[in-house]
Image (cartoon, helix red, strand yellow):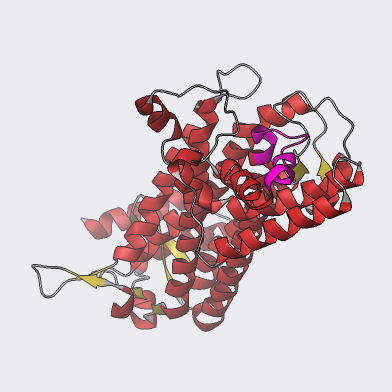
Amino acid sequence: MSEKLWEKGYKVNEEVEKFTVGDDYVTDMKIIEYDIKASIVHSRMLHKIGLLSAEEQKKIEEALSELLNLVKEGKFQIKPEEEDCHTAIENFLVKKLGEIGKKIHTARSRNDQVLTALRLMYKEELKEIENLIRELQKSLERFIEKFGDVKFPGYTHTRKAMPTDFATWAGALKDALEDDLKLLKTTYEIVDQSPLGTGAGYGVPIDIDREFTAKELGFSRVQWNPIYTQNSRGKFEYLILHTLSQISYDLNRFASDIIFFSLPEIGYLKLPKELCTGSSIMPHKINPDPLELVRAYHHAIVSKMLMAVTLPSNLIFGYHRDFQLLKKPVIEAFEVVKNIVRIMKIIFDHLEVDKERSESSITEEVLATHRVYELVKQGVPFRDAYRMVAEKYGREKD
C-alpha cells in the first residue's frame, strides 16, 4: 500500500480522493524525470550541509538513478493512490532504502518540488521550440531563394490591392518569428530562477544552500523571495502560454494565406497533394487539412492562456490546489506548438509557386497606385493624381 506524503492516520472519502487526484498521476509522468534529477541534486545539498552522510547520499543517488532509468525505459508508472510524482519517488526510495529514503523530503515541500520540476521542463521545452523555429526560418530562406523574385498581387479586404513578391511575403513570417524568438528568450530568462528551497512559500526553518542547488540544476540564479516564488506559479505559465500564442498566431495567419493562395481559382501557390487529405464522398477533393489544423490550434493555445491568467488571479498568496489544473494545459501547449512549427516547416519545404499564374494576376487595376505616383513624380499633387486615376478606372468599369 502506497503511503501519501501528507499521511496523518485517517482515510479520505474515496470519491473525494478520486476527485482531488484527478489525472494528475498521469500528467506527472511528463515531469517525473525532472523531479528525479532535482531530487538527486537536493540530496547532494543535504549531504553538503551535514543532514545526510556520504553513504546515505550515495545510496539515495544510486536509487534515484535506477528509478530514472526505469522511467526512461517505460517500466515505471505512478499509481493513482500515490497522487503525484513526488509521492511516487519517495515511496520508491523508502521501499528500496527504508529509513534512509524518508530523509529525501528534508528541507523541501511538494510546492517547491513541483515548481522546480516544472521550470526544468519549461526551460528545456522553450529551447526546443527555439531550435524548431530557427529550422523553420531556414526553410523560409530556401523558399525565398527559390521563389522570392516572383511577383503577385497583394490583397486588402480580400481584394487585389498592390503588387508584392514572395520574398516580401515569406520574409514577413521570418521577421515575425524573429520577434517570437525574442519573446522566447525573455520568457526563458524570467523562468530561469531556482525555486528549490522556498518550501511551501515561507522558506524552511533550517539553513540550506540554495545557490548550490540552483547551480547544480543549471539555473542562472536563485528566486529568493519565497512568497513571490509561489505567486509566480500561474504568472509564469501565463507568460509561457502568451509567448506560445504569439508563435501560433503568426503560423495561423500564414496558414490562411497558403490556403487562400493555393485555391484552384487563384493558384499562386501549389500545395502538393502529399501534404493534403481527401474527401470521403467527393472523389475530386484535395483538402489542405494540415493547414486548417495549424490555423485552428492557435485558438486552442489562446484558450489555455486564458485559463492560466484567470485561474490564479483572485487567489490570496500561498499555494492553492487550483494550481494543479495548470500543469496539463502548459504541457499540451508545448506539444501543440512544436507540432505546428514542424508542420509549417514541412509545408514550406514542399510549397511551390506558379510563376505564370502569379504574375499574370497583376492586372491593370493592381498598378493603379503606381500610376498615381507616376503623376506625382511629374509634379501633380497627390490628391489630384489620385482622383484622376480613380476617374479613369471608374470610366473603364462603366
Q: Against 308, is 86 above or below? A: below
| Residue furthest to the left | 281
Residue 314 vs residue 390, the one in the foreground:
314
Residue shown at 44% from the left, 61% from the top: 162
Q: Position of residue 206 (x, y in %)?
A: 86, 29
Asked whether residue 290 appears in the rendered view, the answer is: yes
Say which quarter of the image contains residue 230: top right
Give the magenta-colored segment's residue range: 98-113
Residue 151 vs residue 92, the one in the foreground:
92
Asked whether residue 264 appears in the rendered view, the answer is: no
Residue shown at 40% from the left, 79% from the top: 353
Residue 198 vs residue 361, the one in the foreground:
198
Report the predominant secondary structure element of the magenta stretch: helix
Residue 191 vs residue 43, the one in the foreground:
43
Marks counted in the figure total 0
Say which quarter of the image contains residue 17: top left
Q: Name the quadrant of the C terminus.
A: bottom left
Q: Is residue 326 magenta?
A: no
Q: Position of residue 165 (x, y in %)?
A: 49, 71
Say which quarter of the image contains residue 23: top left
Residue shown at 52% from the left, 67% from the top: 170
Q: Position of residue 312 (x, y in %)?
A: 55, 25
Q: Against 146, is 187 above or below? A: above
